[in-house]
Amino acid sequence: MYIFETSWEVCNRVGGIYAVLSTRAASMQRIAKDKVFFFGPDIERMFGGTPSPYFTETKSLLPTWQKQAEKAGLHLRIGRWEVPGRPIAILLDSREMMAQKDEIYAHAWEKYEVKSHAAYGDYDESSMFGHYAGMAMESLYRYLVKGQKSKVKGQEEPFVAHFNEWQTAFGLFYLKEHCPEVGTLFTTHATGIGRSIAGNNKPLYDYFEGYNGNQMAEELNMVSKHSAERQAAHFADCFTTVSNITAKECKQLLDRPVDIVTPNGFEPDFVPKGAAFTAARERARHKLREVAEQVMAYQLPADCMFVCTSGRYEWRNKGIDATLYSLRALRDKLDCIRSGKTIVAYILVPAWQNGAKEELGRDDYWTTHRLVNPSEDPIIRTLHELGLYNRPQSRVKVIFVPSYLNGNDGIFNMPYYDLLIGMDATIFPSYYEPWGYTPLESNAFHVPTITTDKAGYGMWIKDLGGTCSIEAGAQVIHRTDSNWGELIASTADALFRFSQMTPEAVETARKSAAEIAEQAEWKHFFTYYEQAYDIAIKHNKENRKKQTL
């Protein structure tokens, strides 16, 4: 079997989909060694800037096809994605498609009823990339099929093409029309409408069954993105999503039940072992302490506890608001007993900033980078409102890192995982989280975590049937549209209990965290993708047979 897969996040570390694909690659390579091809945007050529540290161009890969593709007008580079498994990656420069977008949109409306007329923002750029990826897939398919001619007729290996999120929907539309022999999969990692309802402070859960996706797309000005996502789900040979929570969203908001749920796993090769793990944790803790002391301009106690939250700057959906309010409740709790560890909470959330501070501790005692508009930043405003100032006597201190941790941020200069390994606990009280890689990654690095039952990972942990507590590696807090006070109290209480635990109890919790993550490794979860590939191939054959009748 040959597997094509595309996403805006191939070799382009932006969010959770990068984690899904990059950690799944090794499992894909095990079943189809070098018959796996990832198609991603050539960010360096399209937007300038530094080369991707995750891509190594390799001239010896598919040289004949590359010449054919370039002669046909496709601008691409071929190499390896530098993740476990090192799959083949094809980066595409799709800029020239912008000149044809109106024609492509008109055809997509006539053929698939995709409503691109209301497009704005990144819709054009993403859709044209998706269309270009479909063109590149067709070209590679034709090339590879020729190489199978020597095989016995009827024994040719099947092809599947996997499209992730609405950004790649136009690639699916292209392939369905121009290369129908390839089975197609479409995965929504979070429905655009569900995320938008939650992000616009509407009660997603209390009135869930009353929402209509098309109607909400009009109200929330998401007609084009929703239309592309919805139609890709309907036309795909196999439609998947990442959790049972999001499967309900798909049925309600996209009017299409999924064929199979494909939960997100993790690849253990990302986690150091033995002495290397210990050394990496010590390096991280040294750096976390060093930066915190520079930001606050004073030394920390020797036994301070490091916690963090991280992810996209989605104030409500990611629970950033709940995290800050929980930290204030924790501070008040610690002040009442006037004892306990000092807790340093890192908010690792990229924001609008223009570089690392030349001298930490100037201007304010919270941030590591220069925010462009600090007075309008929700985190800074809330820190002021809650009185979470980093005074020497404060038992809870907050450091805001508004930068991507890609190893070149100017302060830590360490990738996210290299810092995560040094944390004592993590906090993710999410309101909307289709899966939740951040708590899974924490557990994989032996870090106990707090999440909610509105995260797919949190619900999966609950379904395991064990104890959902921070002492057991993962606290799963019940969250609704109306239990804010309970959420804050429960999160603060879990952090408080953890801060009071003995070193032996902490080690037990860390071991339990790793054991939970082990059950979510791709060696357990990849079977769902194998089933999805089979569904796509089967439905593709059935659909093509119907069309010939």
Image: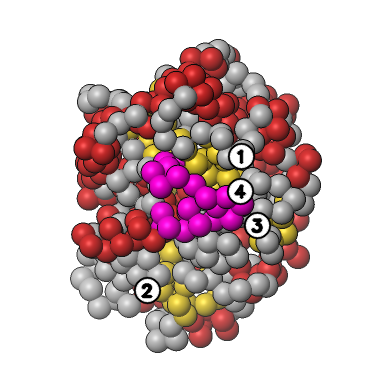
Q: Earlier in the sequence, mark 3 or mark 4?
A: 4
Quadrant where the C terminus sits is top left
Q: Do the residues labelled 1 and 3 touch (CB within 8 Å)?
A: no
Q: Which residue is drawn at 39% across and 39% down?
A: 425
Q: Considering depth in this image, is 177 or 429 the residue closer to the camera?
A: 429
Identify the residue under disc 2.
Answer: 144
Q: Position of residue 110 (x, y in %)?
A: 67, 46
- For image coordinates 52% across by 44% down, the residue present is 346
**Toward which corner of the image does residue 125 lie, by quadrant?**
bottom right
User: Looking at the picture, which amino acid does disc 1 mark?
Assistant: Asn
- Ranked by sequence position, the earlier of labels 2 and 4 is 2
Rounded to the nearest angstrom, the CA distance separating label 4 from label 1 is 7 Å
Pointer 4 with pointer 1, Cβ within 8 A: yes
Q: What residue type is labelled 4?
A: Met
Query: Tag 3, which secondary structure?
Result: loop
Task: Tell which of 207 and 201 is nearer to you.
Answer: 201
Q: Earlier in the sequence, mark 4 or mark 1?
A: 4
- Kindly report the distance in space between the C-alpha atoms of the residues bearing marks 3 and 4: 8 Å
Image mark for residue 360 = 3
Residue 405, x across and y down, in percent: 53, 58
Q: In this view, does 376 lie to the left or right of 380?
A: right
Q: Which mark, by number, is residue 296?
A: 4
Q: How crowded is mark 1: few (under 14 residues within 10 Å), some or many (20 or more)?
A: many
Up-down relation of residue 114 to residue 2 (above or below):
above
Look at mark 1 in the image and give the residue it sits on. Answer: 390
Taking the spot 25% from the left edge, 78% from the top edge, the residue there is 150
10 Å crowding of disc 4: few (<14), some (14-19), many (20+)? many
Query: In the shown orientation, is residue 65 left or right of residue 508?
Result: right
The local secondary structure at tag 1 comes to: loop
Number of callouts in the render?
Answer: 4
What amino acid type should be assigned to the residue bearing mark 2?
A: Leu
Q: What stretch is highlighted in magenta?
A: 284-308
